[in-house]
């Protein structure tokens, strides 16, 4: 323990420090939940839903053509045109749209109208309004899929709560919004989760890729299962294709209380102030939407007890969500004994931060929260690898936490090695633009599979 850190601070973050024994227990419990999601009879009451993605073909590297893609589900909304020229040449033009925050909680119709309007504007700019094109829709929320073009939204996550969408097929809602404008020639829409896009995009260049992971605003993973085990797929016993990508929706792990032994009082506070209390328990311990708030809650408690930042101005920090998760990455980027990034963060928050002990304690709290996130994520990945029972695997990963946190990759790797059986080989690979490239690849495969 660093000597500059007050023992009260150490005590406060103790709950975030999960040991090997607890991690083994998480893997064990997650394995059980995963099986419940897959099996037809237990699926309705399972918390990890293991949704069938209807993606059965991993890319061969031979997919070609031009596809439109829409990406909704993170902090940005994007429209893309993806040209698969060859496996080493994928040309992407994309545009991020300023997503009015009110759209996240307003009526669903306004949301889909906005998507269609942005799509039309983009196609006009690219001179594509008269070109018939297929579209890959990356819609990163829990959906019960009934086909590649049919995804029923089960619940919103990550701060979204638009009315009139839960229980509906989001592809129809998008298609209807496009038709209301009537200016585009979209021939076919396929819908995928961002984890599936991440897996597909990585598998395009790494044929051994079997898992797609997102650790960004939200968290989730998908993996390649044997079709015969995907009991919720109506053709699981008859399909000629051996594999099915399963969208785990692991964010909901713990919604039935099985994760209480790794949660803290701070997690319970965060949960209460979200629009979906009691839901996405695992995600709320792991992902970027919540980590900053966890750190903030610990810090303001220490401030209220006069244990940190005594006499400093914490007015901004007292506001909910004011401590961004990117601050954690910044603060942990400082070399030991240095506080350049930390000072900038404090300056951003209108604080002086004159005491080295306070900055050290702040870093200590950040490390506790980010390490727990990486440990839990490692547990999740190990559960999937155990389930697939393979000796070599590549994991495609995307998301702001994984990309920008200076130690996340090392932490994941370290803890996975400690949990996996010796000799098992794995590689963690950043997956480039899953939501665009991945969506285009699924659209391309769907076009190839279409009866001529
Ligand atoms: C959603 C998932 C998504 C993940 C990462 C979660 O909140 O439920 O569908 O894959 O965020 O974006």
Image (cartoon, grey):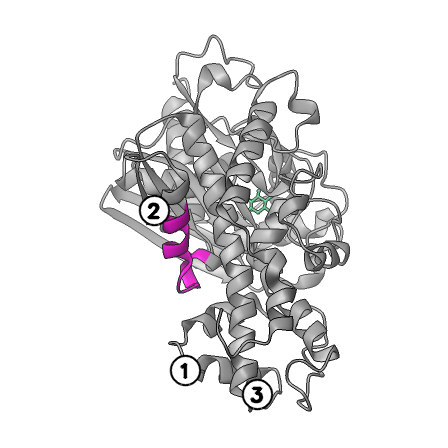
Q: Does the residue at mark 3 contact the one at mark 1 (Cβ under 8 Å)?
A: no
Q: Any mark on residue 139, and which?
A: none
Disc 1 target residue:
338
Residue at position x 65%, y 72% in the image: 8
Residue 66 appears in view: no
Q: How far apart are marks 3 and 1 (CA)?
A: 13 Å
* x, y percent for residue 430: 35, 51
x 45%, y 80%: residue: 341
Q: Name the residue under label 3.
A: 353
N-terminal label among 2 and 3: 3
**Residue shown at 37%/76% (left/top)?**
335
The location of residue 229, given as percent across then percent down, is 49, 17
Nearer to us: label 2 or label 3 = 3
Closer to the N terminus: mark 3 or mark 1?
A: 1
Choose between 377 and 364: the one closer to the eye: 364
User: Mark 1 or mark 2: which is in front?
Assistant: 1
Magenta segment includes 37: no
Q: How many labels does the image show?
A: 3
Q: In this view, does 447 lie to the left or right of 7?
A: left
User: Which labelled disc corresponds to residue 428?
Assistant: 2
Quarter of the image that includes the C terminus: top left
The residue at 34%/42% (across/down) is 202
Residue 369, relative to residue 354: is it above or below? above
Give x and y (percent) for residue 74: 55, 54
């Amino acid at each position: 323990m660093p000597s500059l850190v007050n023992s009260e601070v150490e005590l406060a973050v103790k709950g975030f420090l999960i040991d090997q024994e607890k991690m083994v227990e998480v893997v064990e419990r997650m394995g059980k939940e995963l099986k419940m999601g897959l099996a037809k009879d237990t699926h309705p009451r399972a918390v990890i839903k293991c949704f069938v993605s209807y993606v059965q073909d991993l890319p061969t590297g031979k997919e070609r053509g031009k596809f439109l893609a829409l990406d909704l589900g993170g902090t940005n909304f994007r429209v893309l045109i993806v040209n698969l020229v060859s496996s080493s040449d994928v040309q992407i033009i994309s545009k991020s749209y300023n997503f009015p925050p009110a759209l996240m909680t307003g009526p669903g119709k306004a949301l889909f109208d906005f998507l269609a309007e942005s799509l039309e504007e983009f196609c006009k700019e690219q001179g594509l309004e008269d070109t018939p094109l297929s579209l890959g829709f990356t819609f990163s929320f829990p959906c019960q899929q009934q086909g590649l073009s049919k995804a029923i939204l089960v619940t919103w996550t990550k701060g979204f709560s638009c009315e009139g969408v839960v229980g509906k097929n989001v592809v129809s809602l998008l298609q209807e919004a496009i038709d209301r404008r009537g200016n585009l020639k979209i021939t076919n829409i396929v819908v995928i989760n961002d984890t599936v896009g991440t897996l597909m995009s990585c598998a395009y260049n790494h044929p051994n890729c079997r898992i797609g992971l997102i650790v960004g605003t939200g968290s989730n993973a998908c993996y390649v299962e044997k079709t015969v085990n995907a009991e919720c797929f109506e053709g699981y016993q008859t399909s000629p294709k051996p594999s099915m990508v399963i969208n785990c929706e692991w964010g909901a792990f713990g919604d039935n209380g099985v994760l209480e032994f790794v949660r803290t009082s701070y997690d319970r506070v965060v949960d209460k102030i979200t629009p979906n209390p009691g839901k996405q328990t695992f995600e709320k311990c792991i992902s970027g939407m919540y980590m900053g708030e966890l750190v903030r809650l610990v810090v303001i408690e220490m401030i209220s007890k006069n244990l940190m930042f005594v006499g400093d101005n914490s007015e901004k920090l007292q506001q909910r969500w004011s401590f961004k998760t990117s601050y954690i990455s910044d603060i942990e980027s400082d070399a030991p004994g240095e506080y350049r990034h930390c000072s900038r963060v404090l300056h951003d928050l209108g604080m002086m931060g004159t005491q080295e002990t306070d900055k050290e304690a702040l870093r200590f709290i950040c490390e506790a929260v980010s390490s727990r996130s990486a440990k839990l994520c490692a547990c999740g990945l190990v559960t999937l690898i155990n389930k697939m029972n393979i000796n070599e695997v590549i994991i495609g990963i995307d998301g702001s936490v994984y990309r920008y946190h200076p130690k996340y990759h090392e932490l994941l790797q370290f803890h996975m090695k400690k949990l996996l059986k010796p000799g098992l080989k794995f590689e963690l690979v950043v997956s480039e633009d899953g939501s665009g490239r991945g969506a285009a690849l699924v659209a391309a495969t769907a076009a190839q599979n279409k009866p001529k």
